[in-house]
Amino acid sequence: MERSFSTCFPNQTAVASPAGGTTVLFDLSVRGHHPSYLRHLIEYAGRENSDRSIAVVVSPVFVKEHPDVVELANRTAGTRVVPISEAEFAALPSRKSKWGRLRRYFDEWELLRRTAQRLDAAHCTIMYFDTYLLPLALGASLPCPFSGIYFRPTFHYCQFSGDRPSRKEQLQRWREKLVLKRVLRNPNLHRMLCLDRFSVEAVDRLSPTPKAVPLPDPLDFHPVSEARVSQIRQELGIEPQRRIALLFGALNERKGVLQAIASLRQLPPELCQQLCLLLVGESRIVDGIEAEIAEVLRDRPVQIRRQYEFVPEADVPGYFQLCDLVLAPYQRHVGMSGILIWAAAAGKPVLSSDYGLMGELVRRYHLGIRVDSTNPDAIARGLTQWLLDKNNVSCIESRLDAFALENVAEEFARVIFEAVDEPLSRV
């Protein structure tokens, strides 16, 4: 029988957390930052040497794809991985349609509620909170205090330099504030852990009591040797006179990879001879990327190297140490990007989108060049500025260091577990 969303969560009232219960880390996502976030928390819990009991609730797919994280939890006292069952996972609606995604958010929350009861949870930390805002606004809750990592607020972007929202974005921001106001009145919502540090005051203005906490986006950067960096360059066949612009991560439309390649057609041949574009990461649009590259290479003497595969985290620093510029031409991206932190930790400037949080971080911390990354001509102008005079880039080494240090993994874990331990403030 179909359920009305307004009646999905009957009789869900605030309940005091049970003494001596379990801290639940809930994350049904598998890729991206999710495995590393959980790993940082498990490692911190191991160093903490407390009597905390932690259950890491994940999907069966996570267990298969990230056995290293599962093994780490098994070796850490007081910590265990609790996968949902294959049957529970299979019953979740598909994400392929908008309606399916919406139903899935409600069903996942109900799954979390049952799991929290079964594990005698004292506190639940939801590792991706954004997807559950609507269920919470319509009455969902948990039988214990809970906190969540808030990734993608946009309603405060009006305070950023040069913000020019479309009508669609204006409507989205209004809806976001409306939903968030209701969520923040949930008596068991303990902390909103905000990866966008500039959103904290704006979130608290919507809340009856302060609940927002700035959360670092964690980075554990271990430089590789210069010999290894030289080896990577040799393996990729990068010519010695080339300056390297790196586009790293999931190579998809949202990351602006096609716009970055198209921008090379706007560069004069003498600048193309100085440049190597290095594309590193998995991609589901390889055919489109290769077609765009073929167009560029017809009449531009630029070198383009690509490595369409996942790079283990231990090997990632080498690519950032190798390059001279990090490209982050995201397409009107909402929220944080770890690419900015990797670049700062390696001491490299970025050429970034000027939109939203990313653009504001680049401006405030002097991380590099900001452009309208939806426009290949604008990307080309940024590349030209960098290629003609690398010193004519707003990139201050001390600010790069400060930005990287604000986002160390240790601080990320500390903030989350301190939120768990703080007394619950009732509305």
Image (cartoon, helix red, strand yellow):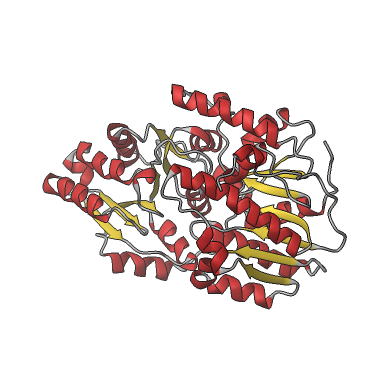
Residue that lies at the very extreme toward the left in this rendered image = 298
Residue drawn at x 63%, y 42% as measured from the top left: 135
Q: List x then y, in percent, for residue 327.
A: 38, 46
Q: List x then y, in percent, for residue 118.
A: 74, 64
**Left or right of residue 373: residue 90:** right
When the figure is inspected, residue 282 is found, relative to residue 100, above or below; the finding is below
The residue nearer to you, when weighing 139 against 418, is 139
When the figure is inspected, residue 206 is found, relative to residue 150, above or below; the finding is above
Question: Residue 319 is drawn in which quadrant?
Answer: bottom left
**Left or right of residue 263: residue 281:** right
Q: Point out the image quarter for the C terminus.
A: top right
Question: Can the viewer see residue 220?
Answer: no
When the figure is inspected, residue 63 is found, relative to residue 260, above or below; the finding is below
The residue nearer to you, when weighing 151 against 387, is 151
Residue drawn at x 47%, y 43% as measured from the top left: 99
**Left or right of residue 292: residue 227:** right
Q: List x then y, in percent, for residue 289.
A: 25, 51
When the figure is inspected, residue 94 is found, relative to residue 67, above or below; the finding is above
Residue drawn at x 39%, y 54% as measured from the top left: 250
Residue drawn at x 65%, y 70% as measured from the top left: 81
The residue nearer to you, when weighing 277 against 396, is 277
